[in-house]
Image (cartoon, rainbow, N blue to C red):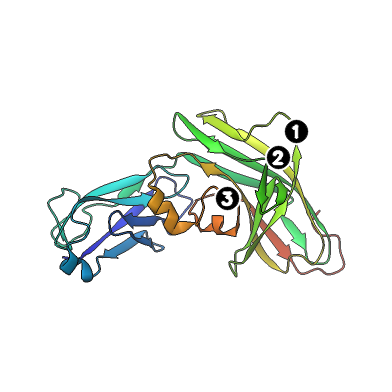
Amino acid sequence: MRRISGKVEVSDNTHRPEGVYVWLQGFDIGTFTDQDGEFEIILPSSAQNSGGGAGILNLYYYLANYKLAKTELTVRNGEFIFANGEINDKGELHRPKFIPRILNISTVLTPSTAKTDTSIFMKVEVVLSSETDSVNVFYPRETFIGPNKLIAPLFVKNLQTGTAFYVEATLVGINQEDLITIERGRPFVRTMLLSMDKGVLSEGQYEIIPYLRVSQPEVPAELLNNLIEDIDSFGLDYLSVPFFRTSGVLSVMKGGGGEGGN
């Protein structure tokens, strides 16, 4: 059988399990779960002839701020051999694969509404809290895109169209680090001030997204290479890396001559 399917569940109830990246080692095949957390992987028919990828391979389940999970699979002559207790003889996971969150990323905007005919000025608070003993995070105060330095970079993503751009913010406070160890019960908070001229944002819903990386050395480099060209470089393709974040949504309404964003 060349097909395997299953379902993924995540440890919090605020997100549908949509967008988890499921990747098969050896064959370098990946897919994203649908809104119900379901997925399907099909081996290419050419693998039967070549015998490529034979042996015990891992099927990985990846969200950047959740613990990496995996299922061991046996492949022989380009087909799955279901001798694993997690898989039935139809190529289906016996039960949903559960992946726990290790880092909660919450963004609080004050205010969280604005109007199209006025400038936008808001406070952005990013709260990082560990749901394990500790988690290491790279959260740079500044970065580069080409020769240009960006201070406190943030992404602004239109939730209707999916288009995005990046902006600079102003850091509030001093003595903050780029490499942070976050321990359970001791959240880390970064506060920034963000301003945008009127007319930059049209009417709609926008997610304000921080730029950070969660340390998970066990994630295969080949998996990441399917998602982003260079995980260590800043750019819009960072948004291709799957995270589950909470809040951080700015509602922009059509202006009518009144004061907006206050």
| Residue 8 image position (x, y, % from top left) | 34, 54
From the image, state whether disc 1 or disc 3 is nearer to you.
Answer: 3
* Mark 1 and mark 3: Cα distance apart in space: 26 Å
| Residue 94 image position (x, y, % from top left) | 21, 53
Q: Tell me, yes or no, whether the two marked residues, 1 and 2, touch with CB atoms within 8 Å.
A: yes
Provide the secondary structure element on which disc 1 rests: loop
Kindly indicate the quadrant of the structure image that contains residue 171. top right
Q: Along the line of sight, which residue is nearer the eye, 2 or 132?
A: 2
Q: Amino acid at mark 3?
A: Ser
Q: Amino acid at mark 1?
A: Gly
| Residue 19 image position (x, y, % from top left) | 43, 59
Residue 19 visible:
no
Q: Quadrant of the N terminus?
A: bottom left
Q: Which residue is located at x 44 percent, y 42 percent?
A: 101
Q: Is residue 186 left or right of residue 113?
A: left
Q: Is residue 182 left or right of residue 10?
A: right
From the image, state whether disc 3 or disc 2 is nearer to you.
Answer: 3
| Above or below: residue 185 compared with residue 120 | above
Q: Is residue 53 left or right of residue 237?
A: left
Residue hosting label 2: 191
Q: Residues within 10 Å of mark 2 (few under 14, many from 20)?
A: some
Q: Which residue is located at x 82 percent, y 63 percent?
A: 198
Residue 222 visible:
yes
Please tell me which of labels 1 and 3 falls first in the chain.
1
Q: Along the line of sight, which residue is nearer the eye, 159 or 137?
A: 137
Q: Residues within 10 Å of mark 1 (few under 14, many from 20)?
A: few
Residue hosting label 3: 233
Q: Along the line of sight, which residue is nearer the eye, 44 or 239?
A: 44
Please tell me which of labels 3 and 2 falls first in the chain.
2
* Mark 1 and mark 2: Cα distance apart in space: 8 Å
Q: Which residue is located at x 43 percent, y 50 percent?
A: 63
Residue hosting label 1: 173
